Amino acid sequence: MYLNTYQKRLVGLVEEYGCLKRRQLEYMVNMYSERKLPNLDGYINQLCQFGGFQKVLHGNEIYVGYKGTEPDPVISDAFEVMMQFAPNILSHSRGRSPAAICFLVQAKEQKKEVRVIPVPPGEESVICAFAEDSAVSDKSRLDIFLLCQKEQMRKMIPKCRYKFALVGGDKVSFFER
């Protein structure tokens, strides 16, 4: 099947992250395109018809991914956090556990690696230990702890550069101590 530039980007995102919300895919594909399209439904429908993709209704969101795959809410929320850094994102990929997503942003004075690390309830100390073990001494890395509940902040005092994030629908809230 011939794929145009937009479809190649859609396929690349789904291959890297699995099922993502349609609006997340549209946002990221358009972020890297000179010509912005108001929606990519036609291209998504072609991928569903001929490219092994499917659309899945999960809650009130439409997810797009390969047939037989289910949305991963943790990856979707981590992706939502990453989108808040656009258009300064230079590169991005799935992270190695426990980081869900890692990306590189252009900050004011230097490039910065950002890791989005989900924090399941009860795992706060384990996640802090991971972040501390891999902390860097300069300001080139930022860990964003993706919380399930704001109360988890009280259980975490990591010794690294960090922020907290909560995702509610398509809204991301960031917190600091």
Image: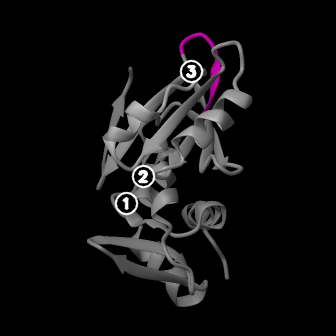
Give the prevailing secondary structure in the magenta stretch: strand
Up-down relation of residue 57 to residue 147 (above or below): below
Up-down relation of residue 141 to residue 28 (above or below): above
Marks 3 & 2, CB-CB < 8 Å contact: no
Number of marks in the rendered image: 3
Which labelled disc corresponds to residue 161?
3
Circle 3 crowding by C-alpha within 10 Å: few under 14, some 14–19, many from 20: some
Q: Amino acid at mark 1?
A: Arg
Indicate the quadrant where residue 110 lies.
top right
Task: Determine whether the residue tagged by mark 1 lies in a helix, strand or loop.
Answer: helix
Indicate the quadrant where residue 102 lies.
top right
Q: Disc 3 vs disc 2: which is toward the camera?
A: 3
Q: CA distance from mark 1 to mark 3?
A: 30 Å
Q: Which residue is mark 1?
A: 23
- Residues 149 and 51: in front is 149
Q: CA distance from mark 2 to mark 1?
A: 6 Å
Q: Which region shows up in magenta?
A: 108-115
Which labelled disc corresponds to residue 27?
2
Q: Is 111 in the magenta?
A: yes
Q: Amino acid at mark 2?
A: Tyr
Which labelled disc corresponds to residue 97?
none
Up-down relation of residue 105 to residue 147 (above or below): above
Task: Determine whether the residue tagged by mark 2 lies in a helix, strand or loop.
Answer: helix
